[in-house]
Image (spheres, grey):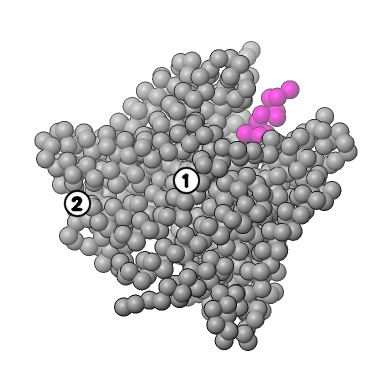
Amino acid sequence: MRANTQGLRWLQTTAYNVLAIGLGITAGLAVVVYAGGQIGVALSSLFLDPITLSGGIQQIFVRFVLFYTMGLGVGLALKAGLWNIGAQGQLLAGMVMVFVVYTFLAFFPWPLLYVSMILGAALGGLLWIAVPTILRVKFGANEIVVTILLNVVALNFAFYMLSGPIKSTGTALGFPITSELPPRFQIPNMPGGLPITYAVPATIAIGILLYFIVERTSFRVKANTVGESIETARYAGISIPRIMTISMLAAGALAGLAGATYMMGYRYELDIGSFSTNYGLVAIIVALVGRKHMLGIGVAAFFFAYLTIGAESMALAANVPTYVVFAMEGIMMIGVLLGNYLSKRRFAA
Amino acid sequence: MTIAISEVVIAVLSTTLQLSPFYLFAGMGEIVAEKSGVANMGLEGIMLLSLVTTFIVDYMTRNPWFAMLVAIGIAGAMGIVFAFFAIRIRLDQIALGLAIYLFGLGISFVIFNTLYPTGLTPNYVGLPPIFAGWNKVPVVGTIFLKQNIMAYLSLVAVVLTALFLGRTSLGLRVRAVGENPKAADNMGVDVNKVRFLATLFGALMFGVSGSYFAGNFVPGFQTDIIAGRGFIVLAMIYFANWKPYRTLFAALAFNMVYAAQNEYVTISGFGVASVSTLFNMLPYVLLLVLIPLFGRKAAAPKFLLKPYTKG
């Protein structure tokens, strides 16, 4: 009986999420039509371009890896009631660290350097979130405020690193750029001519691993208790600083890791364009739509990867700025929150 | 090349006085809203909408005052949307705020681009300096007289907000519904009505800030033009422990460090993207250092972020 209710509730929440996303898409279409675009063209570019255009599938999976890895981090912190608004900053730290390791530890033999670049990126993200973690756990400083501040610092710091320590001799349109990672430092494509790299199965493996570590152990209950009520957690004898520290540091390391897969699996070189899109906020939406569940976040990440590629294509086809995607995401987010509220109310009684 | 120290000092003070009001108006708005228990993290999205409105209406009517008024009205409308979802529907305020931010970030540029597809920004004239004729007065002239009236009103707003929260009965009610809504309710205060008004006031102030941004920070509109400065307001009032005068201190200190490093970078001529970006971090690092030093005693309103249901 109870399982039945849970299933029903899951079904309903999913239905609300689909509705919310439909709402966002409708709003996007409305903007496109208002700007003079044709609805048929808009629909076909939104839904078909991601899979029909050349490179579309590759793009979807590049974003899937980004959104899933970063979303896992945001979701982990959220479980403990902590808002990691700084996933973008940790991502930048990871991207920069790839090239810091590549440049300064160049004397390492190939396999060691390769692994060090990936681990270095995770370490970069971890160090970047260590600041808000310490301030939160030791000083009780609000992690939202500190992660927001660190995003700005990360951007400036990344610019500095790019314009000095890790810069190559070449430039991109007058702006600094790192040297391109040679093929043996890139993440290779899967065999059989698939347009996706090994980063995709690796990311899914991390998600499944985290599912077993987080969702199937007492950690989930402990983190949820800390997230719901500090008083209850204290009363239950849960080590609050430990739960907070673990989930925050893991969140930073995951976002940093996303920097490694983005650089080594897709862009291969760091330039100013690498910083231009704020994936940190999308990671928050993905974590919320995935209901903070380590596997649910994966489904949400794939969906948003597909959707953002489609929406950008639609905007280009209709000659509307791709910024329309942000507005769509905002509306979807409100819709998802509304859906959660409605399904909670329905089953509260 | 020698540069007179006095010139640098004047430039720094002048810039500080010009930039701070943006943080002060929004800061006072967010303090009042958060004191009532509602945090609006969508402030930068609301500011972007009021900023783009200012440019567009000013271009159409050539009346900066009217443009500011419409911009504040748009911000108020966004505030009502936020308040409805946060207070009435009781959605998570942080997630809702980020959603409002994303919406404002996207739609402001789409509107602008649809009206001005070439990307050329209409030439914004802005509000005139308050003491336009006095510009010849040495020293004081350049620091104080070139600012428009909004710069001075922002200081008035700080004093009025402090008086409002500390000395008036409505201010007391605002604090009561944030500290102990149950008790306030028992004493006959309509908790959600007070919260609604406080949230609306906050949004109107974001509108003033967004409008002030035009002309004082940038001459025209671009994508993501506020670039996170709106979010910095949250850090300032957090450091300030929700106190208006300390927020004034935070805003002045932040902008003075910003202006000083900016002058230094300009004078030293580091060129494009280089060591100068390290100096750009300084005002943010300042806040990062101040928060653990003074934030220990930070006492958020007890029912901040917590929706209230009667009964």
Is most of the magenta stretch helix, strand or loop?
helix
Q: Residues within 10 Å of mark 2 (few under 14, many from 20)?
A: some
Quarter of the rendering containing residue A304? top left
Q: Position of residue A213 (x, y in %)?
A: 41, 20
Residue under numbered circle 2: A180
Residue B122, numbered label: none
Q: Quadrant of the N terminus of chain A?
A: top right
On screen, residue A97 above or below B46: above
Quarter of the rendering containing residue B137? bottom right
Q: Position of residue A158 (x, y in %)?
A: 33, 51
- Frontmost residue, A344 versus B7: B7
Q: Judge depth for marks 1 and 2 and give the one in front.
A: 1
Q: Residue at x 78, y 40 (%)?
A: B176
On screen, residue B219 above or below B235: below
Amino acid type, label 1: Val
Q: Residue at x 61, y 40 (%)?
A: B298
Point out the stretch of residues depicted in magenta.
Answer: A336-349
Q: Residue at x 59, y 56 (%)?
A: B249
**In magenta segment, residue A209:** no
**In magenta segment, residue A345:** yes
Residue under numbered circle 1: B289
Mark 1 to mark 2 CA distance (whole Å): 37 Å
Amino acid type, label 2: Glu
Residue sticking out furthest to the top: A1
